[in-house]
Image (cartoon, helix red, strand yellow):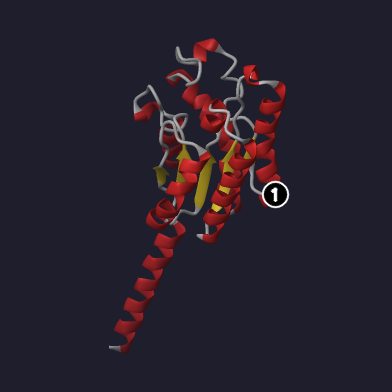
Amino acid sequence: MKSLLNGLLFALLYVTSANASAQGILVVGDSISAAFGLEIEQGWVHLLRERLEERGYDDPVVNASVSGDTTAGGLARLPRLLEEHDPDLVILELGGNDGLRALPPANMQQNLSSMIEHSREAGADVIVLGMMIPPNYGLRYTRAFSEVFTNVSEEHDVPLVPFLLEGIGDRPQLMQSDRIHPTAAAQPKILDNAWPAIETWLEDR
């Protein structure tokens, strides 16, 4: 009987440990990650799931991105998402809509900082995906906007992808007619831009 109980206890501990080690990746973003204008299977987050499987990783990926979301909206949604999914990694892809609405960069920085802090308190690592906005918003604002991502990365010592749409945003053939959202053809490139930071996390954890 004692050996049976010990065996059951070992099995319970093994299952608990296995579940704890595969809690997965939570992507909190806006329309860029929500595959706006595309089939969800065409989006870079879905392609991330496929790449992880192809390379032998069993990490589930939860896409909690909402088109039109701002950093304030993401911050409001995050506590429930952390409680529900208990992720190992949170990928923050927010800020673009703050910029397009010319919201104060200082508020945006505070929101992103709070999201990083909440994620870490929940036991998750964080990667920040940076964005840029068109120059017609003025040099002062566009510079302050871009600096937010660098500031939060340095302040909290989290990996940063400086510009998620690098090599995409300036190529009309890779952008939808609204000139804001990438096409299906651009999605593998978006994943390639984000992948080095994600791969480093996978290898270092």
- Front-lying residue, 201 or 106: 106
Q: Is residue 44 visible?
A: yes
Graded by Cα atoms within 10 Å as few (under 14), some (14 to 19) or many (20 or more), the crowding at tag 1 reads few
Q: Is 131 left, or right, of 20 in this rendering?
A: right
Q: Is residue 56 visible?
A: no
Q: Amino acid at mark 1?
A: Glu
Which residue sits at x=67%, y=26%? 142
- x and y percentages locating residue 108 in the rendered image: 59, 40
Give the residue pinned by disc 1.
155
Q: Quadrant of the C terminus?
A: bottom right
| Total tally of numbered discs in the picture | 1
Tell me the element at label 1: helix
- Front-lying residue, 161 or 82: 82
- x and y percentages locating residue 48 in the rendered image: 46, 36
Which residue sits at x=60%, y=34%? 130
Q: Is 186 left, or right, of 193 in this rendering?
A: left
- Front-lying residue, 129 or 194: 129
Name the residue at the bottom extreme.
2
Tell me: residue 40, above or below residue 150. above
Name the residue at the left extreme.
1
- x and y percentages locating residue 37 in the rendered image: 38, 22
- x and y percentages locating residue 73 in the rendered image: 46, 42
Which quadrant of the figure has residue 153?
A: top right
Which residue sits at x=59%, y=30%? 131
Tell me: residue 39, above or below residue 6. above
Q: Quadrant of the N terminus?
A: bottom left
